[in-house]
Amino acid sequence: MINLVTIAGQRYAVDVGFGRDEALIPLPLQHGFEFTQVHPQRGRLEHRALAQHTDPAQRLWVYSSQAAPGAEWVERNAFSEVEWFAEDYRVSNYHTMFNPTSFFVQNVLAFRRVLNEESGRVEGLLTLFRDTVKRQMAGDGEAEVVETLKSEEERVKALNKYFGVELTPQEQRGIRGLPSELRG
């Protein structure tokens, strides 16, 4: 889901749920708009066709990111300006939420920006993927492993400690039996 908002006549795309490579700022709907994510990562928004399109006249907004200067640009997502309704999302998310082969059924992930308390600017990223919590700060090459988790109990504690996510007992039981469960 991408939220399109208009402020002072300018339309912006805001995607707060995409994850680690999401745009960290509202993106003005301007073809060729480029910006720095968490240095050295860059982001770009273009209004263009995708390679998969059979009709070359089609256009979508395509968000790409680049890990460092000179690196290849990687397409992250594409969206149109067509309004969707709650029913549309329920149908399109069904597979994502319930199919055992879905990435989101197979994995647990969380993402949080690390803010500089003085400037309020994003200076790093904190991620949990499966059983590992990592932190990557601006200018650093590789992300550092903060914690490796061995059980669901440890993962529940890490979600609270690093991401401020407090799961109810019912939510904690909800992962039992799923492919993403840590069975340490």
Image (cartoon, rainbow, N blue to C red):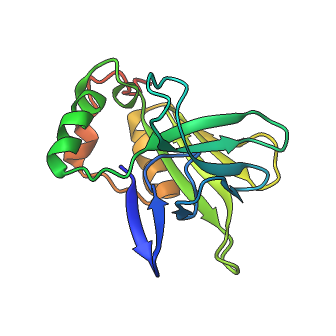
User: From what the image shows, is residue 79 above or below residue 54?
Assistant: below
Measured as percent of width and height from the top left, residue 58 is found at 45, 36
Q: What residue is at 45 percent from the left and 77 percent from the top?
A: 9
User: From what the image shows, is residue 101 above or below residue 96?
Assistant: above
Residue with the most extreme top position: 101
Q: Is residue 142 left or right of residue 18?
A: right
Residue with the most extreme front position: 57
User: From what the image shows, is residue 32 above or below residue 108?
Assistant: below
> In what quadrant of the picture does the C terminus appear?
top left
Measured as percent of width and height from the top left, residue 43 is found at 66, 50
Q: Is residue 132 left or right of residue 157?
A: right
Q: What residue is at 43 percent from the left and 44 percent from the top?
A: 79
Measured as percent of width and height from the top left, residue 73 is found at 70, 37
Query: Of 108 and 121, which appears nearest the observer?
Result: 121
Query: Of 143 and 120, which appears nearest the observer?
Result: 120
Q: Is residue 95 left or right of residue 71?
A: left
Q: Is residue 132 left or right of residue 122?
A: left
Q: What residue is at 74 percent from the left and 54 percent from the top?
A: 137
